[in-house]
Amino acid sequence: MPEPAVDVRDLSVAYRKRTAVEAVSFTIEPGRTLGLAGESGSGKSSVARAIMRVVDPSGGSVRIGGQEVTRLKGTGLRRFRQHMQMVFQDPYDSLNPRLTVGENVAEALVAAGVPRPDHTIRVRELFGRVGLPAAFTGRYPHQLSGGQRQRVSIARALAVGPQVLVCDEAVSALDVSVRAQILNLLKDLQEADGLAYLFISHDMSTLRFMADDIAIMQGGRIVETGPSAAVFANPSHEYTRSLIAAVPEPGSGRRQRRDRTA
Ligand SMILES: Nc1ncnc2c1ncn2[C@@H]1O[C@H](COP(=O)(O)OP(=O)(O)OP(=O)(O)O)[C@@H](O)[C@H]1O
């Protein structure tokens, strides 16, 4: 059997001895999406940060493409980072405002060891893959819309040829129609490249669209997990039921409860 793209076992994360994630386990196969949901503070981003080795896990194991990454350091850690990339909620925070968006993407090519003479053509290719005109490479982040900036972040993530993308609330700041376009783009890229996604979102309708499997976190633990269709059809945990209750049936035309009370 080929190795899963992501294999997390008994992962724990603590901040100054305060446990934020406890004994979290899941796997993601190449070309598949695990949706991670849960209320604010339940530990979703801490799972992502530990997998990316932005924080050191306090326990457990993380295997990416079969390689244990929890104890990697120096060059080994840098090499591993080419296999895993992250897309955040607000590309303004992650793009350098003083560089053009083309230069922002080229920075990732430097990190991936792509020779400089190849940068222009590679950046243009990457812009094409995320649906941006090549002429946009010379613009600055503030000259693009939110959706266009998120496309640039995705191009930058793809620049290193990753196997896994961690999307942490990657579409949460976008308008509904732009959100759908970015989700469709991510699905197309997944199909083309066999990318595995860890897709973190508080929005269950986004997860219903994106995720093959779902894991629900509460208080640092996974309290329910399973194929997305089964979890939505028959949630076993009270907390999952309350998350799903806030989402309309597809096509029902009802607005989300969150919208009604906003
Ligand atoms: N750098 C940090 N130092 C100390 N505590 C932290 C740190 N980052 C997160 N925490 C705590 O760890 C717990 C989990 O936080 P985390 O950000 O992982 O949750 P989350 O589910 O991603 O929340 P949100 O949806 O609001 O981003 C929370 O209690 C949070 O206060």
Image (spheres, grey):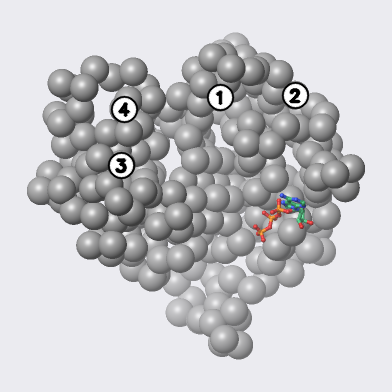
Measure the C-alpha gap from mark 1 to mark 2.
14 Å
Q: Residue at x 32, y 25 (%)?
A: 110
Q: Position of residue 61 (x, y in %)?
A: 75, 24
The residue lying toward the viewer, choosing from 208 and 7, is 7
Q: Residue furthest top?
A: 1
Q: Earlier in the sequence, mark 3 or mark 4?
A: 3
Q: Nearer the viewer, residue 255 or 131?
A: 131
Q: Is 73 situated left or right of 97 in this image?
A: right
Percent position (x, y) of residue 56? 72, 32
- Upstream in sequence: badge 3 or badge 2: 2
Q: Position of residue 62 (x, y in %)?
A: 69, 25
Residue for badge 2 = 61
Q: CA distance from mark 1 to mark 4?
A: 23 Å
Q: Residue at x 67, y 72 (%)?
A: 245
* SS category of the residue bearing label 2: strand
Q: CA distance from mark 4 to mark 2?
A: 29 Å
Residue at the extreme right of the image, as rendered: 17
Residue at 54%, 70% (x, y): give it: 249
Q: Which residue is mark 3?
A: 104
Q: Nearer the viewer, mark 3 or mark 2?
A: 3
**1 or 4: mark nearer the eye:** 4
Residue name at image x 74 percent, y 59 percent:
41
**Ligand 1 - quadrant of the structure image:** bottom right
Give the side of residue 257 with respect to residue 31, left or right.
Answer: right
Label 3 element class: helix
